[in-house]
Amino acid sequence: MTPDEVHIVANGTAHTLPVGTSIADLIARFQLIPKTLLVERNGTALHRSEWLTQLVEEGDRIEFIRVVAGG
């Protein structure tokens, strides 16, 4: 690990990312559709308004949960 990278686990897969990567950056990187997502960081759900300001940190566990409406 270098001082300018962090290691996280997103949906069970390890990733090395640049320091300063936000949750919104991750959503774009993984080409996810924001309006269909619930995001958990270390077991805590994040509000959409936090996605731009929440930066991933070493050891974070991120889960992207796709919300599907049905009937």
Image: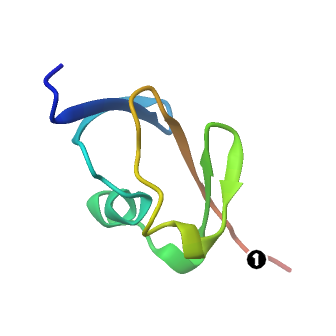
Residue 48 at x, y percent in the picture: 59, 73
Residue farthest to the right? 71
Query: Label 1 sits on what residue type?
Result: Ala
Residue 51 at x, y percent in the picture: 49, 66
Residue 24 at x, y percent in the picture: 40, 66
Q: Quadrant of the N terminus?
A: top left
Q: Residue at x 76, y 76 (%)?
A: 69
Q: Residue at x 69, y 39 (%)?
A: 43
Question: Which residue in the protein does label 1 denote?
Answer: 69
Dot 1 falls on a residue whose secondary structure is loop
In the displayed structure, 52 sits above or below 18; it is below
Q: Residue at x 32, y 65 (%)?
A: 31
Q: Residues within 10 Å of mark 1 (few under 14, many from 20)?
A: few
Residue farthest to the top? 1
In the displayed structure, 10 sits above or below 71; it is above
Along the line of sight, which residue is nearer the eye, 61 or 6?
6
Q: Quadrant of the C terminus?
A: bottom right
Along the line of sight, which residue is nearer the eye, 36 or 7?
7
**Which of the 4 image quarters holds residue 70?**
bottom right
Color style of the picture: rainbow
